[in-house]
Image (spheres, grey):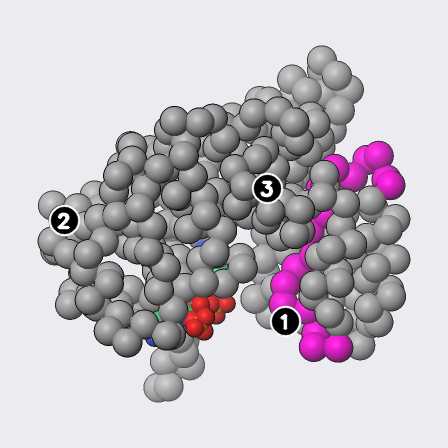
Amino acid sequence: MAVLIDGKAVAAELRAQLRQATQQLWEQRGIRPGLALLLVGDHPASLVYVRSKARACQEVGFHSVIEHLPAEATQQQVLDYITRWNTDPAIHGILVQLPLPRHIDERVVLCAIDPRKDVDGFHPENMGRLVLGLPGFVPCTPAGILELLRRYVGSLSGKHVVVVGRSNIVGKPVANLLYQKTPDANAVVTICHTGARDLAAFTRQADVLIVAMGVPEAIGAEHVKEGAVVIDVGINRLVDPQTGAERLVGDVRFAEVLPKVSAITPVPGGVGPMTIAMLLWNTYRAATGEYGYGQESPHRATV
Ligand SMILES: NC(=O)c1ccc[n+]([C@@H]2O[C@H](COP(=O)([O-])OP(=O)(O)OC[C@H]3O[C@@H](n4cnc5c(N)ncnc54)[C@H](OP(=O)(O)O)[C@@H]3O)[C@@H](O)[C@H]2O)c1
């Protein structure tokens, strides 16, 4: 019987711990973590994500600000907000909701964020730190996946992890996180992408299969080894042509894969809730100065 990896419950537990830690931080040091969120345009999913991030901040006692610019805002307007927040002592974390409109260069914007406030972990300095195994901010979805694996699988040392997807926000950072020589990682990692000629030949070798393709229900029983652990990162909205009703599906055909695996994340309720929980933790760490440049962080101790 497969174990359902309950990201919703783990995220709720992390948020409860954070609420207490935030209270203590205020009482002992007079610091209230602050997160600035910038949204450009009216992408419906982005609106939902930004609002839920702000709501999550409120729940744990953080200060948060949302700036919502129209889709035609200039790159300079975006950079002006970042410059202001970089030096604002009440703001410890800055998050620019992606994707940005096409006329704004995402790389320029992400590079403008002070790496010590880069709670999404997308700045080249934090990405470089991740690759080198140095302390820094780890992107939230990969950090959430590691937390779930730590709780539900335990040691990954020597296990074969296959990651399908090489995006900068999921595939590359999660692969880099899991092969690090750390107690909760130390896995042997294979990365697949559209260049893989026979995807199933790779994925069937996985002890842990992490799927971040953005292709609805692409992975079926034929891709999965008996007893594997499957982490489905995909969030895809399918619209029923008859009723117009929307439903969320992952990149994995859940019902088909379920009888074959030892553990699996559902969609929704698996990886998704962990992303916001890790964003909150990154913001808390930014506020306490534990972003760890020059210090050890939980993901960094050597095996
Ligand atoms: N749970 C969360 O909080 C969370 C967070 C972020 C993303 N997501 C979801 O995760 C999914 C992936 O997001 P993303 O931003 O990483 O997507 P992305 O930027 O579109 O990247 C998709 C990756 O999958 C690879 N791929 C696509 N089709 C493939 C195929 N047939 N065979 C092998 N590889 C294939 C692509 O390969 P190429 O590089 O060769 O094109 C690419 O590297 C999306 O559904 C997204 O909504 C969820």
Image x and y of residue 227, in percent: 14, 49
Q: Find out whether residue 298 is within the magenta segment.
A: no
The residue where tag 1 is placed is: 43
Check disc 2: other Cα within 10 Å, few if <14, some if 14-19, many if 20+.
Answer: some
Q: Residue at x 53, y 57 (%)?
A: 169
Which residue is at the far front?
Answer: 132
Q: Residue at x 41, y 31 (%)?
A: 182
Chain part drawn in magenta: 87-103
Q: How many marks?
A: 3
Query: Element type at marker 3?
Result: helix
Query: Element type at marker 2?
Result: loop
The reply to whether residue 282 is visible in this rendering is no
Q: Is residue 164 left or right of residue 113?
A: left
Q: Nearer the viewer, mark 1 or mark 2?
A: 2
Check disc 1: other Cα within 10 Å, few if <14, some if 14-19, many if 20+.
Answer: some
Q: Nearer the viewer, mark 2 or mark 3?
A: 3
Magenta: main secondary structure: loop
Image x and y of residue 241, in percent: 37, 86
The reply to whether residue 194 is visible in this rendering is yes
Image x and y of residue 185, in percent: 37, 37
**Who is closer to the viewer here, 208 or 16?**
208
The residue where tag 3 is placed is: 129
